[in-house]
């Protein structure tokens, strides 16, 4: 399908153009929302801590004040918090997850492999399953770009710490 290829191409081109995670996610998420006719979206990073209790933390959202959105808050209730490896595996097994809320909005939760999840909020109708399937390699690229941004941040922080000691 030519339309799907154009959407995929435009989204792919928007990914990884900055090593600043906020800028990179801003550019990418904006294109994803526009191309998929979604009105809101968010990226959550999986935070694995040493006690094997994991949580998701928000890295970026459009709009920035998404916390005032009832559909977003419903999505947060779906996403587990303080969970172990088995619960994580179970949750990821349910993805992609689509749910209809009382206002006529659709919540789409999709995996960003090795990084976290992306949530897309759309009104009127849900994303076509073929589009969701087509997004899988693109979301893998977004996850890899996000990881690269965080690694770059850690490297810069390490360099600053080193320079302050010398």
Image (tube, rainbow, N blue to C red):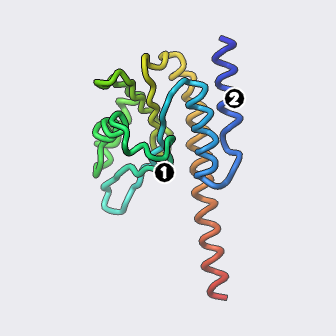
Rendered location of residue 125, percent (x, y): 43, 16
Count of all numbered marks drawn on residues in the image: 2
Q: Which residue is mark 2?
A: 10
Task: Name the side, left or right, on which 15 lies relative to 88.
Answer: right
At mark 1, the secondary structure is strand
Rendered location of residue 162, percent (x, y): 63, 80
Residues packed near mark 1 inside 10 Å, few (<14), some (14 to 19) or many (20 plus): some
* On-image quarter of the C terminus: bottom right
Rendered location of residue 126, percent (x, y): 44, 19
Q: Nearer the viewer, residue 28 or 87?
A: 28
Task: Name the side, left or right, on which 164 lies relative to 118.
Answer: right
Up-down relation of residue 76 to residue 10 (above or below): below
Q: Please tell me which of labels 2 and 1 falls first in the chain.
A: 2
Q: Residue furthest top?
A: 1
Query: Which residue does the image show at 64% across and 42% down from the upper left?
Result: 27
Rendered location of residue 128, percent (x, y): 49, 16
| Residue 37 position by quadrant | top right
Query: Which residue does the image show at 71% across and 35% down from the upper left?
Result: 13
Q: Nearer the viewer, residue 149 or 24?
A: 24
| Residue 78 position by quadrant | top left
Task: Name the side, left or right, on which 80 lies relative to 7.
Answer: left
Query: Which residue does the image show at 57% across and 38% down from the upper left?
Result: 29
Q: Nearer the viewer, residue 149 or 94?
A: 149
Q: Which residue is mark 1?
A: 59
Residues packed near mark 2 inside 10 Å, few (<14), some (14 to 19) or many (20 plus): some
Up-down relation of residue 149 to residue 2 (above or below): below
Contact? badges 2 and 1 (CB < 8 Å): no
At mark 2, the secondary structure is helix
Up-down relation of residue 89 to residue 50 (above or below): above
> Disc 2 and disc 1: Cα gap in Å?
22 Å
């Amino acid at each position: 399908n030519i339309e799907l290829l154009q959407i995929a191409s435009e989204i792919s081109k928007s990914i990884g153009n900055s090593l600043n995670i906020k800028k990179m996610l801003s550019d990418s998420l904006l294109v994803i929302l526009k191309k998929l006719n979604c009105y809101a979206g968010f990226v959550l990073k999986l935070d694995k801590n040493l006690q094997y209790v994991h949580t998701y933390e928000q890295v970026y959202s459009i709009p920035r004040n998404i916390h005032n959105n009832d559909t977003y808050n419903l999505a947060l209730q779906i996403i587990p918090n303080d969970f172990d490896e088995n619960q994580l595996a179970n949750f990821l097994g349910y993805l992609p997850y689509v749910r209809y809320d009382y206002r006529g909005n659709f919540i789409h939760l999709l995996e960003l492999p090795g990084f976290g999840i992306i949530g897309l909020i759309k009104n009127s109708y849900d994303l076509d399953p073929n589009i969701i399937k087509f997004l899988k390699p693109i979301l893998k690229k977004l996850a890899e770009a996000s990881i690269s941004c965080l690694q770059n941040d850690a490297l810069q922080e390490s360099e600053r710490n080193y320079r302050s000691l010398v």
